[in-house]
Amino acid sequence: MLLKEIKTIFHKELDALYPKEEVDSFFYSLIEHYLKLERFVLVVQPNLAITKVEEQPLFKALAELKLEKPLQYILGVAHFMDLELKVNEHVLIPRPETEELVEWIISDCRAIHSRDLKILDIGTGSGCIAIALAKNLPNAKVYAMDISEETLEVAKANAELNTVEVECIHMDILNPKEIEYEFDIIVSNPPYVRELEKEEIKNNVKAYEPSIALFVPDEDALLFYRAIIVFAERYFSKKGNLYLEINQYLGKETKALLEAQNFSEIELRKDFFGNDRMLKGKLD
Ligand code: GLN
């Protein structure tokens, strides 16, 4: 079939579900991934034909896109900063807001020229935060914690793929066990979306992404932050910095948790979209 005919079929089948530009972008990502064809190929070779075998993954992906499966899960690949990461349904697809949190940590660490930092990422998922930190702070020793073994497998594979060392810790932060490490920096993007906010969450997220990584009960939305703070108080070496991704509607409340535990230099930052999204505090 001609490649341009397949593109037309993509639009016919998907334009009711997604904006046209997104359908174009899906199509180009798919031909790049499966056929190694650049997006301008249709400009240069408008009548390019592909074989039945070559068509197959494109039509399989089309069927999955119709069911609103995220493209990253279809391809098994996501991008975070300049990293390529494997993803599957055990891990959340990394979000751009989280890149901003990582950039904050990197710029703080570079500014103080710290060496030999020990950094822990709690609830690492794909490993995006831990791996990006390890890549950008070569003197740091980075640890990645998660409740799920399957998730840690993905994080481990991603560390290898990106040629960094990250030590995995299998642990539920809500039921912590004794460990022998101490950390200078703890970072976390824990579950923080309340059930009452589910309406705002897109179908593809609700249907495919791991709900254990996203949702918290309405009546105890900050449970992970409380557990992380208790853990930080216990496992920070003499002093430490805590960096958190937070629920945009609970900036004040999450900040109050740090204030109540005598954190200093507390700073709440907005993300690119103007939402309260990141929090930092220091414990002496
Ligand atoms: N920012 C994510 C979302 O909007 C939520 C991430 C989280 O719960 N930690 O889907």
Image (cartoon, helix red, strand yellow):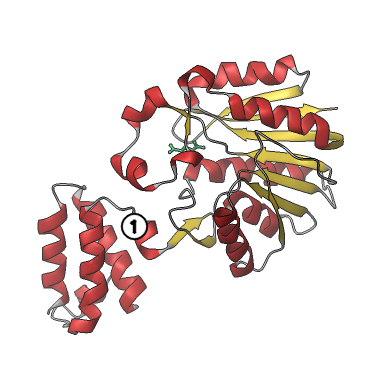
Residue identified by numbered label 1: 71
Residue situated in front as seen by the camera: 151 or 6:
151
Q: Quadrant of residue 62?
A: bottom left
Q: Is residue 279 left or right of residue 126?
A: right
Q: Position of residue 16 (x, y in %)?
A: 13, 47
Residue 50 in view, yes or no: no
Q: Is residue 64 above or below residue 196?
A: below
Residue at the (54%, 54%) spot, across then down:
81
Q: Residue at x 81, y 44 (%)?
A: 179
The front one of 169 and 61 is: 169
In terms of image quadrants, where is residue 51?
A: bottom left
- 134 or 200: nearer the eye? 200
From the viewer's perspective, is residue 231 above or below residue 25?
A: above
Q: Is residue 191 left or right of residue 185?
A: left
User: Which residue appears farthest toward the right when viewing the image?
Assistant: 238
Q: Residue at x 14, y 70 (%)?
A: 6
| Tag count | 1
Q: In which quadrant is the C terminus drawn?
A: top right
Question: SS for tag 1?
Answer: helix
Circle 1: is it few (<14), some (14-19), or many (20+) Cα within 10 Å? some
Residue in the picture at 49% in, 49% down: 94
In the image, residue 17 lies at what x, y percent? 18, 47
| Residue 134 is at least partly visible in this image | yes
Give the left or right position of residue 248, taking residue 222 as reference.
left
Q: Residue 144: percent from the left, percent from the top?
A: 68, 50
Residue type, mark 1 in image: Leu
Indicate the position of residue 1 as horizontal and vertical percent values. 12, 79
